[in-house]
Image (cartoon, helix red, strand yellow):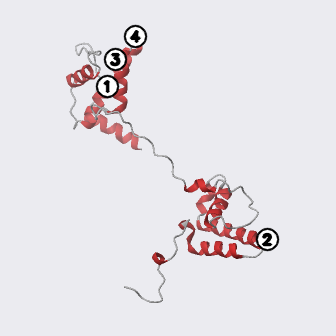
Amino acid sequence: MDIQGLDYNTGREKLLMPEYGREIQKMVDFAISLPSKEERLKCAKTIVRMMLTKVPQIRENAGYEQTLWDHLYLMSDKQLDIDWPFDVTGAETIHSKPSPIPLPQKRIRLRHYGKLVGELLEKLKTMPESAERTELIRQTANQMKRDLLTWGHGSADDEKVADDMARLTDGAIQLDLGRFKFEKMTALTVDEGKKKKRK
């Protein structure tokens, strides 16, 4: 439906910084058109004060005044010729996108144990016999059991953990279930641990 006389935002020029609104953008355009540098600077200072009323939460950030002047510089499309009270040469970095974080490319053999447990098992393969290795085996086995309780629908048996540990370390770690004691845990205690983390 096209009603003559109505002005829709969809038909207007796109705003560079929509958080300040179209009225502030009009003020910036007006400031650019002023004939003298003094008038433009005076107008720019007023615009910055108005910008602050649009986003008052910006005061919580350190160096918020620099940010406001950077935004003004961008909104003017670098056309506002004034003696800038702040260095605005780095303003363009505000809109630059960070480079994407690369995802781990290595395939996790058993996803319910996760990447970190996989790395621990790889480390255990080559570790020499020591008290540190024994403690790491104990912690890794207990974490594997917790992971099974969490992601294995609440069922985890000691033999499954021992079997997975032996298989994933190519036989380097063989848990003696007659001597090795797992920490006492149930699906209920794992759920309680999750709730504590959320608080």
Please give the name of the residue rendered at 64% of the width and 67% of the height, measured from the top-left corner.
Answer: 76
Q: According to the image, label 3 marks what residue?
A: 125
Q: Amino acid at mark 2?
A: Glu
Q: CA separation, marks 2 and 4?
A: 76 Å
**Labels 3 & 2 near each other (Cβ < 8 A):** no
- Callout 4: SS: loop
The span from disc 4 to disc 3 (Cα, nearest Å) is 13 Å
> Mark 2–mark 4 contact, CB under 8 Å?
no
Element marked by disc 3: helix
**Up-down relation of residue 42 to residue 63 (above or below):** below
Which callout, 3 or 2, points to the residue nearer the camera? 2
Mark 4 and mark 3 residues within 8 Å of each other at the beta carbon = no
The residue beneath circle 2 is: 38
Q: Secondary structure at mark 1?
A: helix
Q: CA distance from mark 4 to mark 1?
A: 19 Å
Q: Which mark is residue 142?
A: 1
Give neighbour class at mark 1: few <14, some 14-19, many 20+ (Cα, 10 Å): some
Residue nearest the viewer, comparing 14 with 138? 14
Quarter that holds the N terminus:
bottom left
Q: Earlier in the sequence, mark 3 or mark 2?
A: 2
Query: Which residue matches tag 4?
Result: 130
The label shown at residue 35 is none
The image quadrant that residue 147 belongs to is: top left
Instruction: Give the mark nearest the N terminus, 2 or 4.
Output: 2
Q: From this viewpoint, which residue is outermost toward the top? A: 129
